Amino acid sequence: MLVGVAAFVAACSGGGSVPAGNSTGGSAPGNSTGGSAPGNGAADTSTSNITNVCSVVTPADLVAAFGGSWDYMTGAAPLTCDFELTGNESSSALAAGSAVEIVLKPNSYAASGMGLAQSIDGLGEQAGVLGNTLFIKRGADVIEILTMPYDASAKAQAAMVALGKAIYSRF
């Protein structure tokens, strides 16, 4: 069962780690606005018009939810926004060197397997947390908030939920 859960988390999180030290100095990365990523083969029922996640999530959102100081990281795809903890680590819900990734997955709800996650009431149409990832349903889309390195502590999960509640209406 544990291997299955780990495979699910890896598949849903987009995999991969975030390279350290790729700060852009406080401005949003210049990601392309070239449309949304392909869905899961279903009809295009995406409910979001977002083409650049970094245009709707800011370092201030992460400060409010996680504490600490945050900055954008470079190299993300338009529907992914990565942030790194850059200071005041002692006041953060996460450890020094941590990162948070926010991903919009258009048309992926049907294939998301969100039913496996611990349910979170009062967030979006449906929300659940599984380990270090918060999944939020919005129409046919899924918004994911992922902590790296892996941190499934109650403090980290509560911060992910706070961030999700702050940004959900922007999607």
Image (spheres, helix red, strand yellow):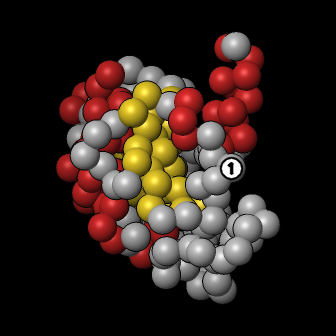
Of 29 and 112, which appears nearest the observer? 112
Position of 103 with respect to 121 (left or right) is right
Residue in view at x 24 percent, y 41 percent: 67
> Which residue does the numbered mark 1 point to in the structure image?
111
Q: Residue furthest right?
A: 41
Residue 110, percent from left and from top? 64, 53
Q: Secondary structure at mark 1?
A: loop
**Please, what is the three-letter code of the amino acid marked with disc 1?**
Ala
Quadrant (top left/top right/bottom left/bottom right) for the C terminus: bottom left
Q: Nearer the viewer, residue 52 or 97?
A: 52
Quadrant in which the N terminus is drawn:
top right
Residue ID at (25%, 28%): 90
Q: How many marks?
A: 1
Compare residues 34 and 70 and report the one nearer the observer: 34
Taking the spot 40% from the left edge, 48% from the top edge, the residue there is 126
Q: Residue at x 50, y 26 (%)?
A: 131
Residue 65: quarter of image: top left
In the rendered image of this protein, does residue 45 appear above or below residue 13? below
> Which picture quadrant has residue 42?
bottom right
Q: Position of residue 77 (x, y in %)?
A: 65, 67
Q: On the rendered structure, is 150 left or right of 75?
A: left
Residue 116, given in percent of the width and then of the height, sits at: 56, 30
- Mark 1 burial class by Cα count in 10 Å: few <14, some 14-19, many 20+: few
Q: Is residue 62 visible?
A: no
